Every structure is written in C-alpha cells, then in structure tokens.
Image (cartoon, rainbow, N blue to C red):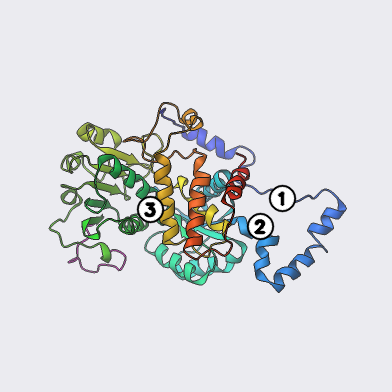
Amino acid sequence: MSKITVSKEEVLQYHAQFPAGKIGTYVTKPLSTPRDVITAYTPGMGAVCEEIAASSERVYQYTGKSNLVGVISNGTAVLGYGDIGPLAAKPVMEAKAMILKRFAGVDAFDIEIDATTPEEVISVIKAIAPTFGALNLEDIKAPECFQIEQALIKQLDIPVMHDDQHATAIVTSAALLNALLIVNKDIAQVQIVFSGAGAGATATAKLLIDLGVNPAHIIMCDRKGVIRKDRKELDLLKAPFATDRSVHTLHDAVVGADVFIGLSSGNVLMPESVTKMANNPIVFGLANPLPEISYQAVMDVRGNDVIFATGRGDYPNQVNNLIAFPYIFRGALDVRASAINGAMQRAAVQAIQALAQEEVPILVRKYYGGTMGFGKEYLLPKPMDPRLLDTVSIAVAQAAIASGVAKKPIHNWDAYRLELLQRVGH
C-alpha cells in the first residue's frame, strides 16, 4: 500500500480555499419563480405548519429532520489535543459533518457549545434536539460524556451516540475479531490489556464482553497503573474492570497477554514489554497522532508474528471510526430508530468484520495503491470502500427493526439498497 502524506501548509491551504471551511448548505426544492416563493415561504408554508401542529410525526414527512444529524461538541476532549475549547474543535466537527454527507448522504450541522458541566451540556442539547433526526456527540471528556449521553438517551426519542465511545468500540472490535481469526485464537480465552480507561476504552471493553470476551481476562490500566480492586476512591466507571491479579503496572500486565489495546497516549508501551507477550500477539496502538508504541518499534521486536494496528492512515490496519459512524446513523435514520442500541452496534461490528474478508474491489485498490486482501495487514475495509454504505447501513437498519426500536420498518431491501447508492451518487 502506498504511503499517503500531506504537509501542514497543504492542510491549511485546503481549509482556507473559498469558501472557508468544509461544509455548507444547499437548496433542495425549486425556488426560481414567484409561485415557488409563495409555496416555499409565505403563505404556503403555513399549511405545512398546520399539518405538523396537528401531528408531530409529520415533521419527518415535510422537513429535513429525517435526514439531519447534529454533530455536537464542547471541545473538552479533542482527539490528540485534549481540552482546546469549542472554537478549536470546530474543524473536527465540520469534518464529521462532511464525512456523514459524503459517505452516507446524511445532512449534518456542526454545533460547538460553550458549556462544560454535564447539566449545562444536557440542557443545551436537549433544547436544540427538535431540529435533528439524530445526535452525534463528539470530543466530550470523560467521565462527563457518559452522564451526558445516558441522560440524553433517556430524555430524547431520537438516536444519540457518543462517537468516541461507540464507533471506536465497533471498529476496534471488528478489527480484533478478524485478528483473532487470523491467529486462530478463541475470543473467550484471550487475555486482553487496555492502556486507557476513558470513553473509548471502557466502551470497547464492554462491547468485547458482549461479543464473548471473558471479563476476568481483561486488565485495564490508566495513568496510575493497573486498575485494581484495592485502589482507593475507585470510580463507578472503572470499578467493573478492576482486577485483583498481582499486577500493578502496564508492563506487568502485558506479560503473557494475547492482546494489547491502546486508547490512551503516545509511547507508553515499551518494546521489551511486547517481547513478553504471548505467541502471535495482537497490538493495537490507537492513540493519535502518536500511537502507544511506534510501528517500527513493534516490527523490530515482534515483526515475525505480531499483528499491529494504529489509528493512523500511513500504516497498515488503520482503525478509523469513519468506517462505522456514517453508516450507523444512515441505518438508524432510515428506519426512524428511537435509539442506537447494543444489537445495532453488534450488527455493525459483524458487517464490517465480514466485509474485510471479501475480495477488495479494483476501485479501492486504485485509491490506495498496491495489493491488499484479508490478512495480517488488512483487518478492516478501507474508508473509501463504497461497499460500506449498503453493507453496514442495512445491517444496522435490520438490527433496529429486529430489536424493536424502529418506527418505520423497511420491507423492500433491494429497493432500499438502490436508494442508498443513489444518495451518494454511486
């Protein structure tokens, strides 16, 4: 695979070209004649207002709510930068909105809010929620993000997903399931060590348990070391992952481990620690921009049997939530789901995992260069793979219907598949 690089100057020039930023709006109905004006605006719009006032469900028929996602952040946990505030988070949120539109045909507005306490954030988001068909929470720091997401899920009747938690967990889990398949290890038997105990790590651990990992086989580490049951002031989020094993540091924990999953910060895992892992180790250094251990360092000490993944696009096996969240929202919106539940998340994992095992289309090979196919350096589909749209969206929509959260079931899946492709111009 060809290595793709871009300079800081090129990035800044890309964003500054007219019009500045990455998203805008466009008109979806004719507005070229006096008749169009009175139909779209006054007095014509009054008839639509009356219809919606009589039955709120008609808002999905007559407005853009059914295809509109709010991408919302307060900028307190921007990937790789931390608490940089809502203004500096805006380029990231614009990118999320851009990706939703480009890859899944989902309209999205980015909304950056100047609020930090959970109560403030919940109040602001709840107040603006009627605008949207779904909400994508982004880059809100832990532990507040858990409280915020759970409160909004309970109080709103539209899908709410904190992407840093769930899309990260979905893509990481799909990659791990394929890696275990390649090294012929049983998910119920593998020993897993996490570096990081924030939103992404805890959500990933919970999803892996749902998929068959033995909770007793997980060791989770934070900045203080191994999360142990004898730790004082153990919070409610970390307590379920506390261990009483005789290990205290990350480097103790990885001895004999089958899997390392890093969702923390760069350069925290030493090469000599990797040498002490089990045969055919799986190492996911997912911190960005610097992984927990560099690609070269891992290859130098375990290049003969390791499977390695990062969150970066310039090495094999990029674990990128881009291959999940656009299609999760697409499927959820199209069946008018009231939530994005565990069944829908598991369906997304299985769809992504299975797609990686199929032959890679010529178009995708052209995008990325070189040869690629399911194996140690190809655990996941590439972000530009057009098959993700119908494969993952349909899996999520079907799971929503089967689990009882869909308000608008789909009956003709062939027609729906065609509609999906037409949305993005395939």
Provide residue 286's location: percent of width, then percent of height. Answer: 34, 45
Q: Residue at x 45, y 27 (%)?
A: 369
Label 1, label 3: how far apart the Cα atoms are: 35 Å
Left or right position of 45 against 405: right
Mark drawn on residue 28? 1
For this view, does 166 lie left or right of residue 54? left
**Three-letter amino acid code at disc 3?**
Ala
Task: Indicate whether 115 appears above or below 305.
Answer: below
Residue 267 inside the magenta-drawn segment:
no
Q: Residue at x 50, y 48 (%)?
A: 92
Image x and y of residue 7, in percent: 46, 32
**What is the crowding at mark 3: few (fewer than 14 residues within 10 Å), some, or many (at least 20)?**
many
Residue at point 82%, 55% (across, down): 37
Discs 2, 1 touching: Cβ within 8 Å: yes
Crowdedness near tag 1: few (<14), some (14–19) or many (≥20) residues, C-alpha within 10 Å: few
Q: Is residue 76 visible?
A: no
Residue 317 in the image: x percent, y percent? 36, 38
Q: Depth check: give the residue in front, 328 or 318.
A: 328
Residue 309 horizontal/vertical position (percent): 33, 40
Can you say which quadrant of the picture contains the N terminus?
top left
Rendered image: mark on residue 169: 3
**Circle nearer the N terminus (2, 3):** 2
Q: Nearer the viewer, residue 44 or 273?
A: 44
Residue at which label 2 appears: 64
Residue sticking out furthest to the left: 246
